[in-house]
Image (cartoon, rainbow, N blue to C red):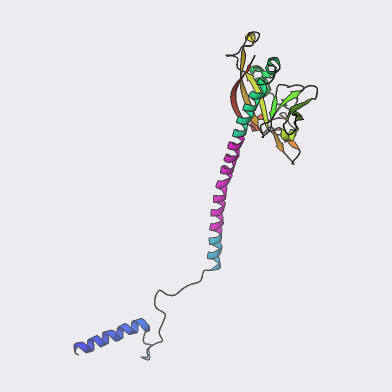
């Protein structure tokens, strides 16, 4: 066998491997599909498993948005609390000194109220020094004659008093005397009285667009009001004689 015949035999063998194999009768079988090109469809079990994995992944991703949304809401409320603190300072400066001083509470009284499970800051007859603020920054001061917290209606000219309803009371505000800077004994001659301004929220939670219930108010039990459910920020301030 010469070299040419060997080359032809090798070529024939390669063609047989590529396009088909000989059957037992010695005939060349029909060409088969090239190796590696066969495609298999997904089974129902594989599809269900893939959907389940995708759903779990999406739930995990969506779960990340809840803390982010809450964080954004907290930042927004904190900025509103800062505006309310500024509004309180401005309101106090516009009031007579003695009237503003009556709103400054002793630290011992505030601690007593905080430890009292029956303490209701929305009871103006017992706690007239408590202030309430709206998200807009408007401040309500308790008026004994009206038996309500009154703010200012800036939509009218001249400005008139506006009653704050429960749905408006988002911030609860306490003015707590700074005993170190302004002891009670020095009030008669003091040029100013320093205080710490505590802002807590939400004081009320909306149930409808016009009605609200106090945050932390329980339906029964030994502690009808749980003040720990509120956010809190502290600021400083003073009233000038």
Question: Dividing the image into 4 quarters, which one contains the N terminus?
Answer: bottom left
State the residue at coordinates (53%, 54%).
Answer: 57
Q: Is residue 180 left or right of residue 173?
A: left
State the residue at coordinates (80%, 22%).
Answer: 145
Q: Is residue 224 magenta?
A: no
Res. 234 visible in picture: yes
> Which of 161/12 is in front?
161
Q: Is residue 56 magenta?
A: yes
Magenta span main SS = helix
Image position, residue 229 (x, y; %): 65, 33
Q: Quadrant of residue 106?
A: top right
> Which of 120/211 is in front?
211
Image position, residue 121 (x, y; %): 71, 26
Image label count: 0
Res. 115 visible in picture: no
The magenta stretch is 52-77
Question: Dividing the image into 4 quarters, which one contains the C terminus?
Answer: top right
Q: Quadrant of residue 136?
A: top right
Q: Quadrant of residue 89?
A: top right
Q: Residue furthest left?
A: 2
Q: Residue furthest right?
A: 145
């Amino acid at each position: 066998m010469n070299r040419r015949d060997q080359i032809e035999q090798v070529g024939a063998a390669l063609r047989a491997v590529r396009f088909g194999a000989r059957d037992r009768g010695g005939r060349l079988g029909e060409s088969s599909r090239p190796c590696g090109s066969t495609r298999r469809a997904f089974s129902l079990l594989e599809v269900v498993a893939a959907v389940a994995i995708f759903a779990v992944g999406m739930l995990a991703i969506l779960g990340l948005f809840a803390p982010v949304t809450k964080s954004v809401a907290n930042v927004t409320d904190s900025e509103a609390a800062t505006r309310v603190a500024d509004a309180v300072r401005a309101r106090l400066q516009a009031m007579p000194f003695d009237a503003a001083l009556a709103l400054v509470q002793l630290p011992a009284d505030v601690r007593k109220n905080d430890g009292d499970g029956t303490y209701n800051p929305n009871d103006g007859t017992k706690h007239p020094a408590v202030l309430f603020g709206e998200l807009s920054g408007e401040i309500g001061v308790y008026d004994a004659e009206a038996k309500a917290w009154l703010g200012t209606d800036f939509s009218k000219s001249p400005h008139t008093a506006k009653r704050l309803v429960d749905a408006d009371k988002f911030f609860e505000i306490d003015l707590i005397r700074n005993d170190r800077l302004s002891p009670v004994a020095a009030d008669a001659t003091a040029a100013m009285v320093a205080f710490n301004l505590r802002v807590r929220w939400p004081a009320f939670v909306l149930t409808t667009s016009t009605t609200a219930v106090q945050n932390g108010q329980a339906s029964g039990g030994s502690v009808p009001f749980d003040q720990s459910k509120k956010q809190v920020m502290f600021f400083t301030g003073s009233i000038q004689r």
